[in-house]
Amino acid sequence: MKLASDIGKCQGYGNCIAADEKHFDLDDDGLVVLLEETVTDDEKATVEAAIRSCPVDAIWLEVAK
Ligand code: SF4
């Protein structure tokens, strides 16, 4: 699975980083950066918790086609 983000929506709340420091960080402008786009099956639950914690839906998992 692959992570995606829309920094145009990100408000820099940092909830995603609190939930998952491996995949998310904030850049110098205080907007989300994906440290790792690939999500393994073992990491999925943690990543999904981070996605749910984002109040503005700025991060999501891309569905494989
Ligand atoms: S939780 Fe959402 S708004 Fe907050 S830093 Fe992460 S992506 Fe941005």
Image (cartoon, rainbow, N blue to C red):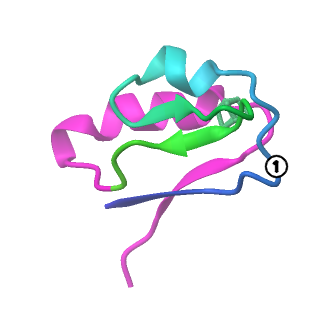
Question: Which residue occupies the foreground of this view, 55 or 38?
Answer: 38
Displayed-image quarter of ligand 1 = top right
Label 1: which secondary element: loop
In this rendering, position of residue 36 left or right of residue 32: left
**Magenta residue span:** 38-65
Counting from the top left corner in percent of width and height, residue 3 is at 44, 56
The crowd level at tag 1 (other Cα within 10 Å; few <14, some 14-19, many 20+) is some
Question: What residue is shown at x 17% (from left), y 37% (from top)?
Answer: 42
Direction bottom: furthest residue: 65
30 inside magenta stretch: no
**Amino acid beneath label 1:** Lys
Given residues 20 and 30, the one toward you in this image is: 30
Q: Position of residue 58 (x, y in %)?
A: 70, 47
Describe residue 43's horizontal placement relative to residue 46 as left or right: left
Q: Which residue is mark 1?
A: 9
At x 33% / y 29%, what residue is drawn? 22
Q: Does 5 sit above or below residue 15?
A: below
Res. 31 image quadrant:
top right
Left or right relative to 62: residue 11? right
Residue 40 colored in magenta in the image: yes
Q: Is mark 1 within 8 Å of ligand 1?
A: yes
- From the top left corner, tell me how far across and down residue 12 is, in percent: 75, 29
Quarter of the image for the C terminus: give it.
Answer: bottom left
